[in-house]
Amino acid sequence: MREKLAFTASFWGDSAVVCRASEDRPAPVVNQEFGRFETWTQASAFAAGLNDGFDLDCAEVRDIVTSAYLRRSTLLNSIEAGSCTCAGGTLRPKPLSPRMQFVLAELALAITFCRIGATSQRSTQAARLRRNARKALFDALHFVLQSNPCSFCMEKLSGQISILHSALQDTCIPTGLDG
């Protein structure tokens, strides 16, 4: 059975683009070769012309595009539901979720940014490094609030968050967590 394709318009930054949706594939994908359009209406008209070339009526296009968005939603929900897959009461911890690994890596990089920024001779570079470190702290705290990690993950996160918070205090950048 051939894969069903349909085209739709979407916003991309300040302009509109044409996206290709495949039935039962997650999310429509931007087709950069069609370029950017000044308005969504122009992109939609272009997408409609492409769909006419495939002999797709409006209902079929809607079904294919909706299917792609639903697949994306299902995929994102499964990732969110599995955000904490580590200990779960077992003696041998399972691997950390990719999202948890990313947050821990971002925290470690932010700590390195603070150390480099503290020794940097250029104030603009140091300020940028500290700003990136502060953003990583915010991202980690947001992750903790949104994902409700288990105690094993929370222990790993809190240690790194504390180190980063101290590193930011040592570089005289207020974190909003003071006092």
Image: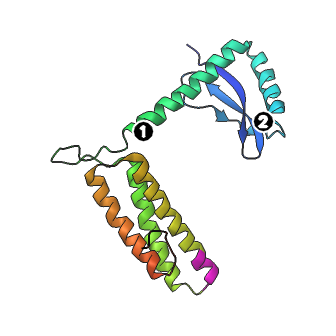
Task: Specify the quadrant of the image occupied by residue 22.
Answer: top right
- The kind of residue tagged 2 is Phe
Side of 75 where 125 appears, left or right:
right
Instruction: Please determine whether, in this image, residue 132 is positioned above or below residue 43.
Output: below
Residue designated by label 2 = 34
How is the structure coloured here? Answer: rainbow
Magenta range: 122-127
Residue designated by label 1 = 79
Q: Quadrant of the N terminus?
A: top right
Image location (x, y in percent) of residue 68: 58, 26
Verify whether residue 174 appears in magenta: no
Side of 21 where 96 appears, left or right:
left
Image location (x, y in percent) of residue 46: 81, 27
Do the residues under discs 2 and 1 have CB atoms within 8 angstroms? no
Image location (x, y in percent) of residue 157: 34, 60
Side of 112 where 49 appears, left or right:
right
For mark 2, give the secondary structure. helix
